[in-house]
Image (cartoon, rainbow, N blue to C red):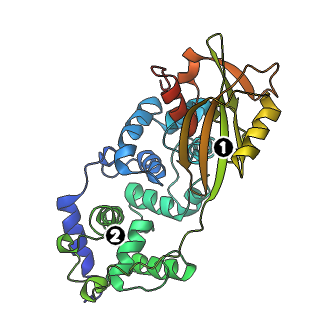
Amino acid sequence: MIVGNEWVPALLRWFDEAKRDLPWRVNHPRDPYHVWVSEIMLQQTRTETVKDYFLRWMTAFPTISALAQAPEEAVLKLWQGLGYYSRARNLHKAAREIVLRHQGEFPNTLEAVRALPGIGDYTAGAILSMAFGSPVPAVDGNLLRVIARLFGISDDILSLKGKRTIGRIAQTSIPQDRPGDFNEALMDLGATICIPRAPRCGACPLNDFCTAFRENRTGELPVRRKKKAPTIYEVTSLFIRKEGALLLHKRPETGLLASLWELPTFLGKTEKESRKEAERMLGNFEGKILWTHRHVFTHQIWQITVYLGAIPRSLPDSSYEWVDEGALGTLPLCGPAEKCLSACLPGAILTR
């Protein structure tokens, strides 16, 4: 049973012994730039995947100023494969704002940090607590799940009421002397032990305090509303080569996969609809199928069929370009295009 905040010392003792060895945790207190980049990368992405990306990023852009001075295409190229590219664009925009408004030094107040592009309450809490020692909770999915089980909270953790309830508990529980460790301990506990399904309660340092464990409700908690079903699109893509060059399309500067390069790609509710649009834009093509793939985004699913296309008489507009196959590694490719080219152009260098 929970009495006051007596669970917090147990959590921190466990963290001191079991915390994960991660490349962005090298310094203590932490470098705010490292915390910021790692937390943005970790959104919607597995920790093991992020490790190598983080190290490559810090080699290419070791400081906020280096990131601010980099061209956007270089930033997107380094991000290639992580997905959710608006995260990279916002990192780039925010770095430029920090250089312009804060002389290249990461700000240390909640108001200033929250004003930066792409930084919400969670990321601000992580940066302020870990790098500056401010007692601000970092309320992410792990913290929501752990606190909901620990205190037996039956509200939907994604609802305003649920988030407020858990946020208040986290705020009153966070220790003044170790706020960053408190936040990271909850992240690690949620990532390794208090996991969404089949939590490892026998290994949990908080099982003596946990309401869900005591009441045998770990399978019921936390409560989360069901996500809306994604929209499914039938997608026609064309693989068209000409004298060592490949026809690519640069996506618009806003929206899904903004500013990334892809094969000429056309969406429709049906395969017939997407093929018709492809023929309208680039002319008739053979029915030879080179590759098929199902690509899942957060709110969309693309069922992709790649056809061998014919060289068009002219290109529809300037967003279409013939790209030398040896230069493919210099362009930021969207996920579906990178996978397709890996399959259709074995041996091609797609990353640099």
The crowding category of the residue bearing disc 1, from other C-alpha atoms within 10 Å (few below 14, some 14 to 19, many at least 20), is many
Q: Which mark is residue 220?
A: none
Estimate the x, y position of residue 18 in percent, counting from the top left: 20, 59
Q: Which residue in the structure is indicated by mark 2?
A: 197
Please name which of the two marks, 1 or 2, marks the residue nearer to the observer. Answer: 1
Local secondary structure at mark 2: loop
Local secondary structure at mark 1: strand
Instruction: Choose between 298 and 162: the one closer to the eye.
Output: 298
Cβ atoms under marks 1 and 2 closer than 8 Å: no
Rendering quarter of residue 181: bottom left
Left/right placement of residue 283 relative to residue 101 reads: right
Left/right placement of residue 220 relative to residue 251 reads: left
> For the view shown, which residue lies furthest in the top direction?
243
Q: Quadrant of the N terminus?
A: bottom left
Relative to 142, residue 260 above or below: above
Relative to 39, residue 147 above or below: below
Estimate the x, y position of residue 107 in percent, counting from the top left: 53, 52
Instruction: Choose between 18 and 9: the one closer to the eye.
Output: 18
Q: Which mark is residue 235?
A: 1
Relative to 342, residue 299 above or below: below
